Image (cartoon, rainbow, N blue to C red):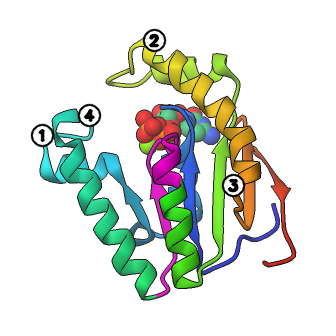
Amino acid sequence: MDPLPDPALVVLVGAAGSGKSTWATRHYAAPEIVSSDALRAVVGSGPADLDASSEAFALLDQIVSGRTRRGLTTVIDTLGLDRDRRLRYLARARETGLPAVAVVFAIEDRLCRQRNSARDRPVPAPVLTTQLKAARATLDLVAEEGWDRVVVVDQGVAEVTIATPAST
Ligand code: CTP
Ligand code: MG
């Protein structure tokens, strides 16, 4: 993979267990990564405490706002499947002059299910099916949303940039 712009606003997109957090920690320093799971654990009883979601996302937005205002690299580690949220992050990148990067985890369903079932708290199978479907649809959407770079992570190993407009 060509090096990603740095600083940048990087938005991860992918189903549960598709390898987002693993990829993020491999490529970025811990303070650069803003994770909805981690923030659920801060304001709730743990990363899976869905009752804490709205407060966790409010904090996430505040952290993204503070870091991007300072021009700091910010990696948003959420499912990334909510289009309105994704477009708000993209708008924030534009406002602050940061390059906007979407990283889509398009691993095989089978591999994602395998990883999910091996985890402590697997996401229920039907929920994962919905997320996998949404992630595939998002792959087409992001290409049209205006990101400076779209990176596709395939199998969690190969990484292919599918769009590199001249602006970066
Ligand atoms: N994993 C792996 N090889 C990779 C990436 C991930 O074996 N290349 C494993 C991780 O060790 C973990 C599981 O797959 O046990 C899920 O990876 P994770 O990065 O946690 O997935 P996320 O997409 O972050 O899942 P979530 O949305 O639930 O946070
Ligand atoms: Mg994760």
Q: Is residue 47 visible?
A: yes
Cα–Cα span, label 3 and label 4: 30 Å
**Residue 7 coordinates in the image, percent (x, y):** 59, 81
Q: Position of residue 114 (x, y in %)?
A: 56, 18
Observer-side mark, 3 or 2, equals 3
Nearer the N terminus, badge 3 or badge 4? 4
Mark 3 near mark 4, Cβ–Cβ under 8 Å? no
Q: Earlier in the sequence, mark 2 or mark 1?
A: 1
The range drawn in magenta is 71-86
Instruction: Name which residue type carries label 2.
Output: Ala
Determine the residue positioned at 52% across, 80% down.
95
Q: Label 4 neighbourhood size at 10 Å, few (<14), some (14-19), many (20+)?
A: some
Residue furthest bottom as drawn? 70
Mark 2: give few (<14), some (14-19) or many (20+) Cα within 10 Å.
few
> In whole angstroms, how far apart are the C-alphas of marks 4 and 1?
8 Å
Q: Which residue is mark 3?
A: 145
The amino acid type of the residue labelled 3 equals Glu
Instruction: Identify the secondary structure beneath mark 4.
Output: loop
Which amino acid does the dot numbered 4 rest on?
Answer: Ala
On residue 45, the disc is: 1
Residue 19 in percent (x, y) is at 56, 40
Point out which mark residue 48 bears. 4
The alpha-carbon separation of the residues under discs 3 and 1 comes to 35 Å
On screen, 9 above or below 132? Answer: below
Q: Which mark is residue 125?
A: 2
**Residue at horizontal 65 percent and vertical 16 percent from the top:** 110
